């Protein structure tokens, strides 16, 4: 089975991730998921591709910490985080987060917290490629 | 030597992603940053986070040792 926390170039399967999560416990009553996708439009211009670069070793450690923290903080039964790097065409999948709990509340809360914290804490950078040129994304506060 | 890592927008502005910096006794993170910022001012304008050996380093007075890996990073934009 693939690791619960991964950074990879290749695409992922949501079904496969959810199957792995469900196999971890029969006590799961709900799974909340977040799928980040590559938009084809940003800041009033067309975007054809996104390109992601990571400080790989640190990013993986930080994502594993986030998973551990979310499990402890929200009482999750399990969680998975997959983030792609490299070039992703518009419309492609970027990041997948799944949080499993006995009830929906902690699953939703844990999933939301994980993606919010990932954006703040994990050293990954996004570049938008457009016909007008490439530009690194500057996050909004 | 200290391995300096730059990523994404910082590396683009500096025109370089990795470089080796001669370590000297009692070198601090702040001193390393100041010296590199003098060489790559545009890149260091957007540096928000620093990591030493993969851990965020918030104290600029952190002492550096031979063999350390130091990353200077812009605000993250993953997800």
Image (cartoon, rainbow, N blue to C red):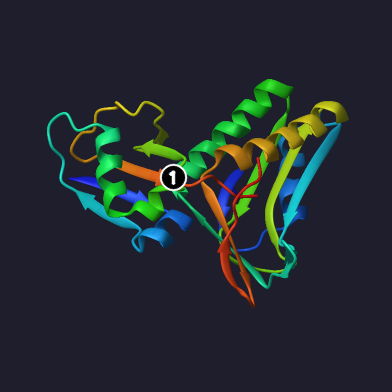
| Residue at 23 percent of width and 33 percent of height | B64
Q: Where is residue A2 in the image (x, y as percent from the top left)?
A: 60, 49
Q: In this view, does A8 lie to the left or right of A100?
A: left
Q: In which quarter of the image is the N terminus of chain B?
A: top left
- Residue name at image x 66 percent, y 22 percent: A72
Q: Quadrant of residue A12?
A: bottom right
Q: Position of residue B26 (x, y in %)?
A: 16, 28
State which quadrant residue B42 falls in.
Answer: bottom left
For label 1, the residue is B47
Given the image, what chain letter belongs to the residue carrying mark 1?
A: B
- Considering only vertical position in the picture, is A45 above or below A141? below
Instruction: Name the one closer to the observer, A134 or A13.
Output: A134
Taking the image as drawn, is residue A104 in sight?
yes
| Residue A9 showing in the rendered view | no
Left or right? Give the position of B16 relative to A91. Answer: left
Measuring from the top left, give residue B49's x and y in whole percent. 45, 39
Q: What element carries label 1?
A: loop
The residue that appears at 26% across and 40% down in the rendered structure is B32
- Placement of B8 over or under A22, stated as above or below: below
């Amino acid at each position: 089975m693939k690791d619960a926390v991964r950074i990879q170039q290749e695409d992922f399967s949501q079904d496969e991730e959810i199957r792995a999560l469900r196999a971890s416990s029969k006590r799961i009553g709900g799974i909340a998921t977040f799928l980040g996708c590559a938009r084809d439009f940003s800041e009033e211009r067309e975007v054809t591709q996104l390109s992601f670069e990571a400080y790989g070793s640190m990013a993986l450690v930080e994502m594993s910490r986030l998973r551990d923290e979310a499990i402890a903080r929200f009482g999750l039964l399990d969680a998975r985080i997959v983030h792609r790097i490299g070039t992703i065409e518009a419309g492609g999948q970027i990041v997948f987060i799944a949080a499993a709990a006995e009830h929906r509340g902690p699953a939703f809360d844990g999933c939301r917290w994980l993606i919010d914290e990932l954006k703040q804490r994990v050293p990954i950078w996004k570049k938008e490629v457009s016909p007008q040129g490439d530009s690194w994304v500057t996050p909004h506060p | 030597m200290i391995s300096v890592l730059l990523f994404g927008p910082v590396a683009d502005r500096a025109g370089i992603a990795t470089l080796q910096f001669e370590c000297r006794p009692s070198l601090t993170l702040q001193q390393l940053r100041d010296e590199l910022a003098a060489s790559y001012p545009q890149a260091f304008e957007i540096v928000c986070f620093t990591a030493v050996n993969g851990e965020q380093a918030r104290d600029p007075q952190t002492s550096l040792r031979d063999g350390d890996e130091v990353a200077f990073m812009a605000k993250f934009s993953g997800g």
